[in-house]
Amino acid sequence: MDKDFDKWNKEKKGLEKTGPNELPFHEREIWWSSIGLNLGDEQDGKNELFERPILVIRKFNRKLAWVLPMSSKEKEGIYYYQLEHDGKIFSVILSQLKLLSVKRFRRFVRKISPEQFLEIKNKIIELLNNDQ
């Protein structure tokens, strides 16, 4: 399947002009975010806004955060963490930690529990310490 990078580039230019420069967001929050079209096996956004839910892992300031993309497909293994919400399983993709500008943030979804957040952070640390 060919990716329409030109369409994403146009959307990204619009986000640069109209996206918020600052946003009151917090760690543990899930947001729909325009993460765009990416290369290879990097997680892409969906729909005309190239969106995907993301989990905020570390807030650096009101403009930047480390985030993890999420999938509505249940995925297993050391690179995933399952979250349940309203009887549905979502996968947090631990291997695709990335820095995002809040200009990409679209709308707030919800906040996960402190216990779930700690488990996710510990799994990231395990991945960093794993000498495969």
Image (cartoon, grey):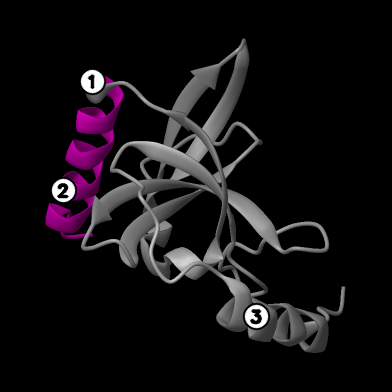
Q: Position of residue 42 (x, y in %)?
A: 56, 68
What amino acid type should be assigned to the residue bearing mark 3? Lys
For this rendering, which residue is in front, 13 or 40?
Answer: 13
Q: Is residue 70 above or below residue 45?
A: above
First in sequence: mark 2 or mark 3?
Answer: 3
Q: Position of residue 40 (x, y in %)?
A: 62, 76
Element class at badge 2: helix
Is residue 110 found left or right of 52 in the rendered image? Answer: left
Q: Which mark is residue 12?
A: 3
Residue 8 in sight here: yes
Can you say which quadrant of the picture contains the C terminus? bottom left
CA gap between label 3 and label 1 equals 35 Å
Q: Which mark is residue 52?
A: none
Q: Which mark is residue 125?
A: 2
Is residue 16 found left or right of 29 in the rendered image? Answer: right
Q: Is residue 108 above or below residue 39?
A: above
What amino acid type should be assigned to the residue bearing mark 1? Glu
Is residue 72 found left or right of 4 in the rendered image? Answer: left
What amino acid type should be assigned to the residue bearing mark 2? Ile
Question: Residues in magenta?
Answer: 115-132
Kindly report which numbered mark, 3 or 1, lies closer to the viewer in this rendering. Answer: 3
- Residue at mark 1: 115
Is residue 125 within the magenta segment? yes
